[in-house]
């Protein structure tokens, strides 16, 4: 199965619909009980996450009734839903609000992410910015671009090669274990600068559009990374697990 521009545009519009209906009306308006902890004080879920995922899932089921649908919040309740993602004929992987901590804190750095997996391979990735009202989109073999709110398309490319001393990037330390944690601590200070947005959606945007040289993540949940990795690769970037193996939908 292939995804042409029309199919990808439909998916992009779906993410924007969810943002307009369920996310933006709650931004900086979350009430008591609208935010809950999952595993820690830094791992949150809001009513926006739950309702946006529900809307996206329902529309996908109508349009692609035989597809596997993997949503972050559904998997939080039932991790068994991840089983078979690497073997599915067609699967959609949803992060309804990437950057939930920012969203819940009133910080305008969050996004809606969708990865499309066909027979174990990511074939499309879409990241919607509800604040900027635009999309970062990549399709296997077709490159990556920003689709602006007014409809114009802007091709994106990763940054040109540079010495480590001139690189800027992000390292997510939270889930790193030894000896990788110490190894990265020794080496990341050799870079020009580091940043951390607590939002993979925006970090992948910087990376794919050439405004950052690297990102390092350790907790590789598919809703956080399938879309962004595909977009980054289609923009000319290199992506791999820390052991050098390719990152695949089956790595859950």
Image: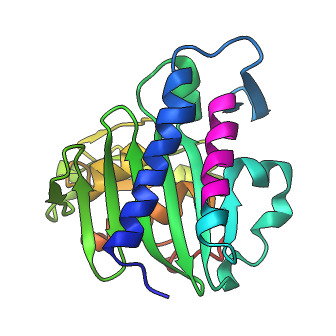
Tell me where residue 132 sits by quadrant. Answer: top left
For the point 75% across and 78% down, the residue is 84
On screen, residue 114 versus residue 54, left or right, reads left
In terms of depth relative to the viewer, which is nearer, 110 or 189? 110
Which x, y percent locates residue 30? Answer: 62, 16
Residue 197, relative to residue 55: is it above or below?
A: above
Which x, y percent locates residue 45? Answer: 70, 33
For the point 53% across and 42% down, the residue is 18
On screen, residue 8 versus residue 183, left or right, reads left
Which x, y percent locates residue 95? Answer: 58, 50
For the point 79% across and 73% down, the residue is 83
Secondary structure character of the magenta stretch overall? helix
The part of the chain drawn in magenta is 47-59
Residue 54 lies in the magenta stretch = yes
The answer to whether residue 224 is visible is yes
On screen, residue 17 versus residue 39, left or right, reads left
Residue 97, relative to residue 25: is it above or below?
A: below
């Amino acid at each position: 199965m292939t995804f042409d521009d029309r199919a990808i545009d439909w998916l992009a519009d779906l993410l924007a619909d969810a943002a307009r209906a369920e996310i933006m009306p709650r931004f900086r308006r979350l009430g008591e009980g609208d935010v809950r902890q999952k595993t820690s004080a830094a791992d949150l879920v809001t009513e926006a996450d739950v309702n946006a995922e529900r809307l996206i899932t329902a529309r996908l089921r109508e349009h692609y009734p035989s597809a596997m649908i993997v949503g972050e919040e559904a998997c939080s309740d039932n991790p068994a839903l991840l089983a078979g993602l690497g073997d599915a004929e067609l699967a959609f992987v949803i992060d309804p609000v990437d950057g939930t901590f920012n969203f819940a804190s009133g910080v305008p750095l969050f996004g809606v992410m969708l990865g499309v997996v066909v027979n174990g391979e990511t074939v499309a990735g879409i990241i919607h910015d509800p604040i900027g009202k635009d999309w970062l989109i990549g399709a296997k073999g077709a490159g990556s671009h920003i689709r602006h709110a007014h409809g114009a398309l802007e091709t994106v490319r990763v940054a040109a090669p540079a010495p480590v001393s001139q690189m800027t990037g992000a390292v997510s330390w939270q889930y790193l274990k030894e000896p990788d944690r110490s190894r990265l601590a020794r080496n990341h200070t050799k870079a020009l600068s580091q940043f951390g947005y607590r939002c993979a959606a925006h970090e992948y945007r910087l990376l794919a559009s050439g405004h950052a040289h690297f990102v390092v993540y350790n907790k590789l949940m598919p809703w956080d990374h399938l879309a962004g990795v595909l977009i980054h690769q289609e923009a000319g970037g290199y992506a791999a697990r820390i052991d050098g193996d390719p990152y695949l939908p089956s790595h859950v």
